[in-house]
Image (cartoon, grey):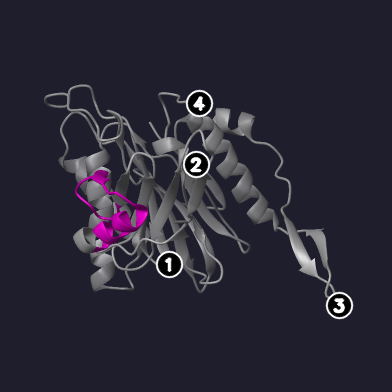
Amino acid sequence: MTLIVGMANAEIGFLVGDTLLTPLLEVKGNPAGVVNGEFHGLKIQILNDQVAIAFSSSNAVDIALNIIAEVWRKLQSNSQTDICVELLEHYQKNLESSGNEKPDCEFLVLQLDEKGNQLVHVTAEGIRPCERCYIGDQAQYKQLNALRKPYLPTEAYVQQPDGSFKVEKANDSKGQIEFMEISLALEELVQQRNKAVGAIGGNVIRVRDAWPSGNLEYMQIGMASLSPEEGQSGYSLLSSSTGTRGVGIYYKSGKLGFLMIVGDAETCRKETAETIQSFIELAAKEYGMNLVGPT
């Protein structure tokens, strides 16, 4: 199943979600997924600087991704496209043309426009604007809230008039605090390796209106270990916000990485690379991605 949480108000706009896909057991040939036998995918797709669509589905991931791809293509040809209406119309057409088993999908649309940050929940029943919303597994959402802890504001070194530095608490907004609390709680949830939700190495996907660009971007992260016992290890979650959008997760010790690309027919691609730089170069040459982040 899936768990994606979103919020949009005057302060912030964000989506946070897992990557684990749960295909039906009747998949032809029962193939193994590329991530330790599991299937993973980019459930939050940034279509352009101002629009991102997240999806949840218990039985029709391919249909949900195809619907988002159709909306993406329409948006490229007509920037005035009403994203939510287009999304709903495509979903309803799929419902009408399906057989006995109807595709079970729902979507969250995050938009930045002249009206401010907007979050919309789209289901078969229609379009519902909201400030906060989640899609996916209800039980896991309750577990997420149980894991949520008060976020301690970060500290910053602030230079004083005499040239010295003073440690002060960062003035985080309520929206930023909520973003961090949800992100940390979801990271803890997926690291429990629950069958319902999961992520590659615990790397949840976080999308928000980034500073200073003001555009929607995938948030990056880097974890490194240089201890004598472990050698050079760790991983980096890199993002591509220009060219072909998406994320790349590279593991230094394994010399391999995973690419999850917006609009890709493959939900997740496994690539070997000797270094993170060669991984970045491969993503650019083969897929047109401009990966940046901790290296």
Q: Which residue is mark 1?
A: 50
- Image location (x, y in percent) of residue 71: 27, 59
Look at the numbered discs 3 and 4 and tell me whether their residues touch, using CB distance below 8 Å: no
Q: CA distance from mark 2 to mark 4?
A: 20 Å
Q: Which residue is mark 2?
A: 134
Left or right, 66 with reference to 6: left
Q: Residue furthest right?
A: 162
User: In front here: 279 or 41?
Assistant: 279
Query: Which of the 4 image quadrants contains residue 87?
Result: bottom left
State the residue lying farthest toward the bottom.
161
- At a point 43% along the width and 67% down the height, the residue shown is 50
Is 280 colored magenta in this rendering?
A: yes
Categorize mark 3 by other alpha carbons within 10 Å: few (<14), some (14-19), many (20+): few
Specify the segment rendered in magenta. 261-284
Determine the image quadrant of residue 244: bottom left
Element under label 4?
Answer: loop
Is disc 1 placed on a helix, strand or loop? loop
Say which quadrant the C terminus sits in: bottom left
Q: Position of residue 208 (x, y in %)?
A: 51, 58
Which is closer to the viewer, label 4 or label 1? 4
User: Can you give x and y, in whole percent of width and height, for residue 119 in the image?
Assistant: 49, 55
Q: Callout 4, which amino acid?
A: Gln
Q: Which residue type carries mark 1?
A: Gln
